[in-house]
Amino acid sequence: MYGIEFFMNGVELKERILAGSVGPGDAERVIDDLEALRDRKPNVFNIETTNYCNMSCVMCPRTTLMTRKNEWIDDNIFENVLDQVRPYTEEELENFWDFVEQRYGVTRETQSENGFYFHIVARHVTLHGYGEPLLDKYILDRVRACSERNIPSYFSCVPANINLERIEQLMELGLGVLKFSVDALDDEGQKKIRGKRNDFTNSFENIQKVIDLKKKRGFKTTIVVTMIAMGVSNDDLETQSRFMDIFDPLDVFNYVKSQDNRWYFEDDDEIENKSHYVSEYCEYPWTSLTVMANGEVVPCTQDYDTEMSFGNVRDHTLEEIWNSESYKEFRRWHVTGDFPTGNKCNERCDLPKIYHRLQKKQILLPNVLKSLDS
């Protein structure tokens, strides 16, 4: 979930920023305008229920960079966070989806990266982070707790880890969305990308079993299958096309996804990132927060080592953290560009920041060049 009202109410300011009508000299006014637009009660984008993982994905910084210990989120902390979440009403979501269709041309039926973000992520609390949710021994309790509060839940997992009995229980408990990642269409390629515990043959068979189970039991869980775009060579594009051909006939929401951590892993510097954020700028500081397995609150899902924690939910409410002076200062950095040296947002992130737009600069990342002057 994220601040859909901020998206809608902030569109005029965004258009001025993107059009170049405001510049560095207007930073203070932009800061004030953004502050006036944001919700005072935070939206929880995701809750990392565990950071245990049995994969070694080449595009994930967890594989080589994460140093925090592996753990499961405490039950009391998890439920305390849920008690601070307000799910959107159907009317609120319908208004937002009308706005999305008008501004971005993304309809309710659009199966794409942005369609997933606007129509699925907007209404669900995400129950994963830098771990594998199917390794969370309490995941059934997590989904049950969400359903008891009428909070739509979603998580992404690796199909090689599927236990059909457990999947059946999750769907029975009301899991809203279950997403699977398939990044190659042969065993060797899947192992190369995700690690030796993964292969395509087993993954595809598992996904088919889940789809059949959903149909047999009449479950409402949306099944999503994605492939990360690892390159733009003819072979890569052919693989992506074959992926769509394989899953299009099935009862799934399928799409090819842009790489999230191109600063960390980039196999092809010509690959296009199709996320709306790349053509605009990062808005996470004003729209949502993330709770990690250790209870630390960080600004988004990309903070794998909780470098930018604004507090712990053991000690503060989400509202206290969201409205804290340190969080406000962080938002200011996004507009002025005055980040401390080494800050992850500024040095290890793919997304343009507002200050890039105000200063009409380019964002340079390892093997990535995105012009912000167009």
Image (cartoon, rainbow, N blue to C red):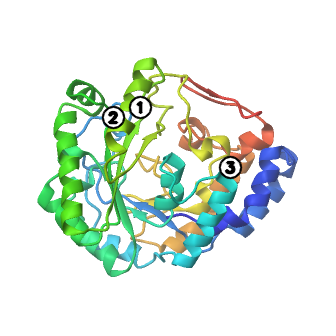
Tell me, for residue 333, which label it has, or none: 3
Q: Earlier in the sequence, mark 2 or mark 1?
A: 2
Question: Which residue corresponds to mark 1?
Answer: 241
Residue pushed farthest top?
234
Q: Earlier in the sequence, mark 3 or mark 1?
A: 1
Left or right for 93, reference 226? right
Q: Residue at x 79, y 39 (%)?
A: 359
- Residue 269, x across and y down, in percent: 53, 22
Q: Are marks 2 and 1 in contact (CB under 8 Å)?
A: no
Q: Quadrant of the C terminus?
A: top right
- Characterize the local packing of mark 1: few (<14), some (14-19) or many (20 or more) Cα atoms within 10 angstroms: few
Residue pushed farthest front?
249
Figure quadrant of residue 73: bottom left
Question: Which residue corresponds to mark 2?
Answer: 183
Figure quadrant of residue 63: top left
For numbered disc 1, what is the local secondary structure? helix
In the rendered structure, which amino acid carries the disc numbered 3?
Answer: Trp
Of badges 3 and 2, nearer the viewer stands 2
In the rendered structure, which amino acid carries the disc numbered 1?
Answer: Ser
Whether residue 40 is situated above or below residue 348 in the rendered picture: below
Q: Residue at x 63, y 65 (%)?
A: 98
Q: Earlier in the sequence, mark 3 or mark 2?
A: 2
Whether residue 104 is situated above or below residue 356 in the rendered picture: below
- Residue 286, x across and y down, in percent: 63, 61
Say whether residue 98 is visible.
yes
For numbered disc 2, what is the local secondary structure? loop
Cα distance between the residues tagged 3 and 2: 36 Å
- Residue 155, x across and y down, in percent: 34, 57
Left or right for 117, reference 328? left
- Characterize the local packing of mark 2: few (<14), some (14-19) or many (20 or more) Cα atoms within 10 angstroms: many
